[in-house]
Image: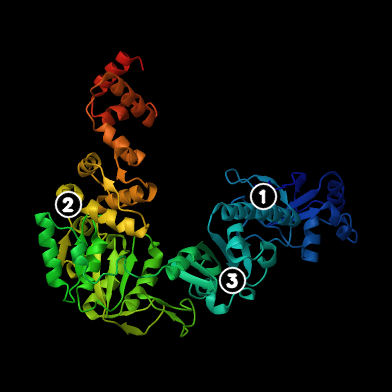
Amino acid sequence: MSSIKINDSFILTSPSTSMSQIKSELSNFEYVIVFDKHYYIFHTTEQFALQSASMSMPIIDWIYKTNWSPSTISTWLDLKTSKVNWERPVLIQAYETNSIHGVLHPSDWIHYLQAENEDVFSYFETLGETINDAVTVVDDKGKVVLWNTAAENTYKIAKQAIVGEFINTYFDDESIVLHKILNEGRPIRGAYHKPNKETHVLVNASPIVKGHKVIGAVATEHDITNIIRLHEEVEQDPLVGDKSLFSSIIGENSSLEEEIEMAKKVSSTNIPILLTGEVGSGKELLAQAIHYDSTRRNEPFITLNCATIPPGLIDMELFGYQQGIFSQPTTDKRPGKLELAANGTLFIQDVHKMPLDVQIKLCDYLENAAYYMTGSNEQVQVNTRIMASTSILLESLIEQGEFYEGLYYQLTVINIHIPPLKERQNEIPTLITQFIEEFSIKYEKAKPILDEDIVETLCHQEWPGNVRELRNTIERLILLNDLPTITAQHLPAELKRQINLHEPLNEASSEKQLIQDTLKRTYGNKSAAADLLGISRGTLYNKIKEYGL
């Protein structure tokens, strides 16, 4: 911060001091201070004002005769208050002792405030540049005060061009969220906004309040244009177009067979369904099977993945929005997934990642078959079947207040659980055969034979990624190999390492190599290496000593 200039060249005199003595003191000091009931200050440059007075006249008589203005006496803490009168120089008083430190001239105070303002703005501007999102600050008239580099990149408007200009010079009034903040004085958090035809952002904005008055507004805008374009471009066709997908779901596990039978029974109803199971277990495939086995088979099957969409965007993606949601409504609307799936099925993946307020809105739709678009007062009625999936226990989220209990009961009228692949190892050979055929056709390759050893190996893996991980592994094998027979040596390196780690430590040479590889993999962390090898740290230390590692 800049330092303030206080003048300590002064002398205190009594009100009876003669004019001649005052003039004499002004030759020795920059200020003469006269104290009667108030403090009266004379600066050396003001000697001309004293010329017409009799030299023997007491200074207090001249003060009363000329109505010379008194000065304010203030402490450092009170300098910025409205109590200080800056028409005359101000006396600076010590807070603890009430003694006078010096005199502060109004021009010096102005210079100090200007320097301080420059310092504060430098902090303010640096903070704006430190944020990756676009930052815009306007005053109470809508004139741009700050426009950071991220804003330049987002809107392709140079800082030099827009700072100092009214923001509506570059944007339509109805698209400026900061106008709403200035008018209403209420903050906005995580709201979808489209400031122009080309840009989509998520906005956090707040009023700048001084006392009880809004003096400006600040907004940070996270650019989600690429995400929006991706959602607009991606086709919503199902992964598989077959209308009898139940036949493609392997169900040789008794518990899975029971779940599939339940799915078949409820496919022709309009009841909401919750599909549960680990990541990659095949919940979306089962949802498609239910849809294509129902009377809605010729209508859309739309997917909404709550894990891949920013939380602030899910409401708009699900229910749609009306343009101009921050000012005057327009008739330009963008339907949400719920409306796009009208008369068909909307499959909501990872429903546990849906924000709580959107959960409540979805629950209301399930109860009333109607909803409101974001930014619209017009009710929309559609007949869309809801299926949802989750890989975690919703009951625990309800206890934590992170999942709406009403929605839970709406979705769990029918709850179908898909057991993990590690509990269905007898199905793996059939799945392997199915995937080989699928990818051989996809990549126009001759169908290879998998060596018995590799099939045995694949059957005994844990498959934390479930069917999806197995499917991806087979796709890789088919894509990267042209041999008639595929063996274990063609497996991905990571999978081969997992296999090696579970092999017994037998021959000394392979054991030494395995320990070396594991230590390299854990960057020398012996505790982590012991865990991966399935042995105690003591045993590992003995092996390291034995092999001279």
Q: For the residue marked with disc 3, what is the amino acid? A: Asp
For numbered disc 3, what is the local secondary structure? loop
For numbered disc 1, what is the local secondary structure? strand
Q: Mark 3: few, some, or many residues within 10 Å (few <14, many ≥20)?
A: some
Report x, y in % for residue 46.
84, 57
Q: Which numbered dot is residue 427?
A: 2
Let me know if residue 208 appears in the view.
yes
Sequence-first tag of 2 and 1: 1
Q: Mark 2: few, some, or many residues within 10 Å (few <14, many ≥20)?
A: some
Sequence-first tag of 2 and 3: 3
Q: Is residue 539 above or below residue 401?
A: above
Q: Mark 1: few, some, or many residues within 10 Å (few <14, many ≥20)?
A: many
Q: For the residue marked with disc 1, what is the amino acid? A: Ile
For numbered disc 2, what is the local secondary structure? helix
Report x, y in % for residue 404.
24, 65
Say whether marks 2 and 3 touch (CB < 8 Å).
no
Cα–Cα span, label 2 and label 1: 88 Å
Tell me how many marks there are: 3
Report x, y in % for residue 151.
59, 62
Q: Quadrant of the C terminus?
A: top left
According to the picture, the residue beneath numbered tag 1 turns out to be 92
Q: Which numbered dot is residue 260?
A: none
Question: Relative to the observer, which residue lies in front, 118 or 372?
Answer: 372
Q: Which numbered dot is residue 140?
A: 3
